[in-house]
Amino acid sequence: MTDPAPQEQAEKKLTPPDPPMVPFVLGGMAIWLVLGLVFLSIRSTMAEHGNEGWIAICFAGVLVALPGLGLMLVHDRNRRRRHAAARDHAHE
C-alpha cells in the first residue's frame, strides 16, 4: 500500500471540534437549578442530617454560571464570525 500524496495529506488536516458553547452553559445551569429545587423540596430531611448547605451550593452554581454564560455568548458570536470569514475566504 502506498502513502497518499503530500497534497492529499494536507487536505485531510484534522481540525479540533468547535461546537457552540452556550448550550453547555445552559445545561449546567439547568442541572444546578433542578438539583436546588429538588433539595429545596426535601429541605427538612436535609436539615435533620446537617446537609442544608447543599441548597445554597446549588443556587450559587447557577449564579456563578451567569458570567460564564455571558462569556460563552461572546465566544459563540466570535465563532460565527470566524466560520463566516472562513466560508467567504473559501468561496473566493
Image: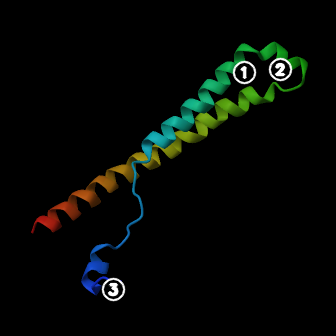
Residue ranking furthest to the front: 1
Question: In this figure, which residue is indicated by the disc labeled 1?
Answer: 39
Helix, strand, or loop for circle 1? helix
Q: Quadrant of the C terminus?
A: bottom left
CA gap, disc 2 and disc 3:
66 Å
Work out whether 11 lies above or below 34: below
Mark 2 or 3: the one toward you:
3
Residue in view at x 59 percent, y 34 percent: 62
Q: Is residue 17 left or right of residue 53?
A: left
- Image location of residue 48, percent across then percent down: 90, 17
**Of the numbered discs in the image, which one, if any, rests on residue 46?**
2
> Which of the 4 quarters of the picture holds residue 83?
bottom left
Work out whether 26 lies above or below 2: above
Residue ranking furthest to the left: 92
- Image location of residue 88, percent across then percent down: 15, 62
**In front of the other: 60 or 26:** 26
Work out whether 21 lies above or below 88: above
Neighbourhood count class around disc 1 (C-alpha, 10 Å): few under 14, some 14–19, many 20 upward:
many
Disc 3 marks a residue whose amino acid type is: Thr
Helix, strand, or loop for circle 3? loop
> Which of the 4 quarters of the picture holds residue 22?
top left
**Of the numbered discs in the image, which one, if any, rests on residue 2?**
3
Helix, strand, or loop for circle 2? helix
State which tag comes first along the sequence, 1 or 3: 3
Residue in view at x 34 percent, y 73 percent: 13
State which tag comes first along the sequence, 2 or 3: 3
